[in-house]
Image (tube, grey):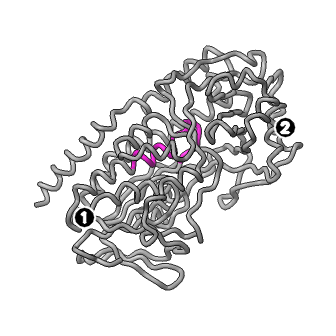
C-alpha cells in the first residue's frame, strides 16, 4: 500500500459484512488510506437473511450510514412472538418482544452491496488470500503475503476474515486452544419463499403484522420472518443434536426423511408439517452446522494487528447478534482510529478496542449458546413448561439491547486518551 501524504495505511483482510462495514466507516477519515483484501474472486455473502437489532441500528446511526438498511430492502419487525411449537402446550404464546426492542431483517447480499456501493474500486482487491503476516519490530509496519506471490505493507492490519480466518491464528498463535471454532451442538436449514407461498402454507394469521415468529419445541426450533421489502419470507428450522460433526464438516444434504426424523418428537405441532413443506421448496436444502468460539478468546489484538466480527467472536445465531456485534466492533474501532494519527498510536487504539469490546462480545457468545438450549427444550430445569420458558428467556436480550452507543464511544475515547498520555 502506498504511503501517500503520510496517511496511516489500514489493510482490512476479509470482505464480508464486517469488513465492508469497517471500510465504509473508515473511508470518511482523510488521514487514513484504507484497502480491503478478499480471498474469493468476488465480494459476496452466503446465507439468506440477517437480523440487525436495535443496538446495531444505533451503532449504524452513530456511524452515519444507517440508510444502508433501507437501500438493502430491510423490513422492520414490530415484534418477535415466541410460541411453544410441540407437545401438550403447543400453540401457547410465551411472550412478545416489544417493538422498542426490535430491529430489522435484511438480505445479506443486498446489505453487502449497499455497504460497498460508495467504496472506491481501487480500495477493493479480490483473490487475495493471506499466507503470512510479518510485523516489523522497529515500527516498519505489517506485511501481508498472498498466495499469488504479491505482498503489501500497512501500518495496521485488521482481520475480518471470518470464523476460520488466518488473522485469528496470527493474533492468538496457531496452536492456542481458542483458535479453532467448535461445533456448538446445533444445525440449521433455511429457505426463502415468496410471501404468498408462505401465507398459503402457514395461514394468514401469521402475516397480519410484520412480526417474527419463533417456535420452541422438543429438541428443535422453527422461525419465520419477512424481508426484501415485504416480498419474501425466510423459513428456518434448527435442531439440537448430540451427533458429532467433524471440524471440517460444515453442511450435509437434507431431504424429507431426514427432516421428518429430526423433528419426529414434535408432537401436536401446528407448525411442523407446513414448515417442512416450505423448507423442501429449496432444491438444494442443506443442514449447516453451527460453530462458535467456545473457548474464551484471551485477546483480539497483537501489536498493530487486530480481529473483529466472526474472526474475533464467532457465535451461534440464537440471540440474533452475530452481525450486530460486528457492527459494534466497527463503531468502536473506527472511533478509535479516527483519533489515531501516528503508527505508534495504533497498538494503543487496538488495546483499547480489546478492552472495550472483548468482555461484551464474549458474554454474547456464551449467552447465545445457552439460549439455543433453552429454545430447544434442552435445559432440564426449564424444558417446555410455559412459565419456566418465560422466566428463562424473557430478559436474556436486555444486556445486548440496553446500551447507549454514544456513551460507549465516549468510554473508548476517554480510555484511549488516558493510555496515549501515559505513553508519551
> Main SS type for the magenta part?
helix
Between discs 1 and 2, the one toward the N terminus: 1
In reply to whether residue 143 is colored magenta, the answer given is: no
Residue 98 in the image: x percent, y percent? 51, 21
Nearer to the camera, 352 or 402: 402
**Mark 2 residue element:** helix
Residue 142 in the image: x percent, y percent? 34, 74
Quarter where residue 277 is shown:
top right
Q: Quadrant of the C terminus?
A: bottom left
Residue range of the region highlighted in magenta in the rendering: 315-329
- Outermost residue, right side: 257
Residue 369 visible, this orientation? no
Depicted 103 relative to depicted 347: above or below: above
Which residue is tagged 2?
A: 277
Which residue is tagged 1?
A: 31
* Marking on residue 221: none
Give the residue drawn at x 73%, y 20%: 205
Give the residue drawn at x 26%, y 63%: 30
Give the residue drawn at x 74%, y 18%: 91
Amino acid at each position: 500500500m502506498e504511503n501517500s501524504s503520510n496517511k496511516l495505511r489500514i489493510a482490512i483482510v476479509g470482505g464480508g459484512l464486517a469488513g465492508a462495514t469497517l471500510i465504509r466507516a473508515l473511508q470518511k477519515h482523510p488521514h487514513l488510506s484504507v484497502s480491503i483484501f478478499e480471498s474469493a474472486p468476488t465480494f459476496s455473502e452466503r446465507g439468506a437473511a440477517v437480523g440487525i437489532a436495535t443496538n446495531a441500528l444505533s451503532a449504524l446511526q452513530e456511524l452515519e450510514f444507517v440508510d444502508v438498511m433501507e437501500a438493502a430492502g430491510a423490513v422492520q419487525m414490530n415484534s418477535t412472538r415466541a410460541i411453544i411449537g410441540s407437545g401438550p402446550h403447543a400453540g401457547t404464546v410465551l411472550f412478545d418482544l416489544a417493538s422498542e426492542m426490535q430491529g430489522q431483517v435484511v438480505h445479506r447480499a443486498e446489505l453487502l452491496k449497499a455497504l460497498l456501493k460508495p467504496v472506491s474500486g481501487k480500495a477493493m482487491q479480490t483473490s487475495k488470500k493471506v499466507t503470512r503476516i510479518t510485523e516489523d519490530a522497529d515500527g516498519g509496519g505489517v506485511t501481508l503475503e498472498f498466495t499469488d506471490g504479491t505482498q503489501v505493507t500497512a501500518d495496521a492490519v485488521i482481520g475480518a476474515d471470518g470464523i476460520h480466518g488466518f488473522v485469528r491464528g496470527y493474533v492468538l498463535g496457531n496452536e492456542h486452544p481458542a483458535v479453532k471454532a467448535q461445533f456448538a451442538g446445533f444445525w440449521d436449514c433455511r429457505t426463502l419463499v415468496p410471501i404468498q407461498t408462505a401465507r398459503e402454507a402457514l395461514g394468514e394469521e401469521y402475516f397480519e403484522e410484520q412480526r417474527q415468529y419463533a417456535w420452541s419445541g422438543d429438541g428443535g426450533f422453527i422461525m419465520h420472518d419477512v424481508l426484501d421489502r415485504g416480498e419474501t419470507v425466510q423459513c428456518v428450522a434448527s435442531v439440537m443434536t448430540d451427533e458429532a460433526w467433524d471440524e471440517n464438516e460444515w453442511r450435509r444434504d437434507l431431504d424429507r426423511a431426514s427432516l421428518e426424523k429430526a423433528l419426529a418428537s414434535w408432537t401436536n405441532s401446528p407448525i411442523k408439517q407446513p414448515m417442512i413443506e416450505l423448507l423442501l421448496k429449496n432444491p438444494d436444502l442443506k443442514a449447516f452446522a453451527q460453530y462458535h468460539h467456545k473457548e474464551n478468546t484471551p485477546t483480539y489484538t497483537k501489536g498493530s494487528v487486530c480481529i473483529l466480527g466472526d474472526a474475533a467472536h464467532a457465535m451461534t445465531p440464537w440471540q440474533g447478534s452475530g452481525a450486530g456485534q460486528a457492527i459494534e466492533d466497527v463503531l468502536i474501532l473506527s472511533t478509535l482510529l479516527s483519533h489515531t494519527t501516528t503508527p505508534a498510536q495504533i497498538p494503543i487504539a487496538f488495546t483499547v478496542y480489546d478492552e472495550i469490546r472483548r468482555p461484551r462480545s464474549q458474554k454474547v457468545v456464551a449467552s447465545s449458546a445457552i439460549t439455543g438450549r433453552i429454545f430447544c427444550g434442552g435445559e432440564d430445569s426449564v424444558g417446555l413448561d410455559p412459565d419456566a420458558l418465560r422466566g428463562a428467556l424473557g430478559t436474556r436480550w436486555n444486556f445486548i439491547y440496553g446500551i447507549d452507543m454514544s456513551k460507549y464511544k465516549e468510554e473508548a475515547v476517554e480510555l484511549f486518551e488516558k493510555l496515549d498520555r501515559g505513553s508519551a
